[in-house]
Amino acid sequence: MTTGVRTAPPAERSPLLTARLAGVFWLLTILTGIVVMAARGGRLGVLVNLVSTACYVGATVFIYYLLKPVNRNLSLLAMFFSLVGCAIGALSALVPLGTQAPTVAFIFFGLHCLLVGYLIIRSTFLPRAVGALMVFGGLGWLT
């Protein structure tokens, strides 16, 4: 037996919190990256590099959730490229993989940036100019 009371459909969650968290993790990635460059190797440099990589993983996950409504498969592919690049970067910080490891990681980061830029351009809730800048950033990583 029903009471005839209708409940409203669940409200969609605003992407604002997810976008802000992604931005915080990207900012932490940049700041720790500056420390890595200033440390110039050594144990502190390796430790901060791993922290920077962890921050970028966090940014990647939040960007995936932010852009999943635009295109789930492309967002998942972008996250895959980023996580592979992070894994290669972290592994090369711990174990000498040769001189080509950073180049390979940059290719994955470039592909990540290209896809994220495309998804931002296609989204209706983020500025297209930011997407265009991400596409140019991706092209920069790839060249």
Image (cartoon, rainbow, N blue to C red):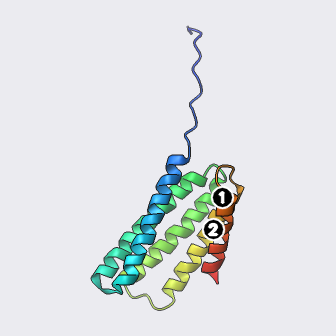
34 lies left or right of 134: left
Q: Which residue is mark 2?
A: 134
Residue farthest toward the right in the current orientation of the protein: 122
| Among the two numbered marks 2 and 1 on one chain, the one whose residue lies closer to the N terminus | 1
- 95 or 70, which lies in front? 70
**x, y percentage for residue 28?**
42, 65
Q: Residues within 10 Å of mark 2 (few under 14, many from 20)?
A: many
Q: Residue at x 65, y 60 (%)?
A: 74
Say which quarter of the image contains residue 5: top right
**x, y percentage for residue 138?**
63, 74
- 91 or 20, which lies in front? 20
Residue 120's tag is 1
**x, y percentage for residue 133?**
65, 68
- Identify the image quadrant of the N terminus: top right
Residue farthest toward the bottom in the current orientation of the protein: 99
Could you tell me which secondary element the residue under label 2 belongs to?
Answer: helix
Q: Residue at x 58, y 37 (%)?
A: 12
Say which quarter of the image contains residue 106: bottom right
Amino acid on which disc 1 is placed: Ile
**x, y percentage for residue 58?**
45, 60
88 lies left or right of 114: left
Amino acid on which disc 2 is placed: Met
Above or below, 69 relative to 31: above
- Identify the image quadrant of the C terminus: bottom right
Say if mark 2 contacts mark 1, CB within 8 Å: yes
Above or below, 90 relative to 71: below
Say which quarter of the image contains residue 131: bottom right
Q: CA distance from mark 2 to mark 1?
A: 9 Å
Above or below, 87 relative to 24: below
Q: Residue at x 45, y 78 (%)?
A: 89
- Number of numbered labels in the structure image: 2
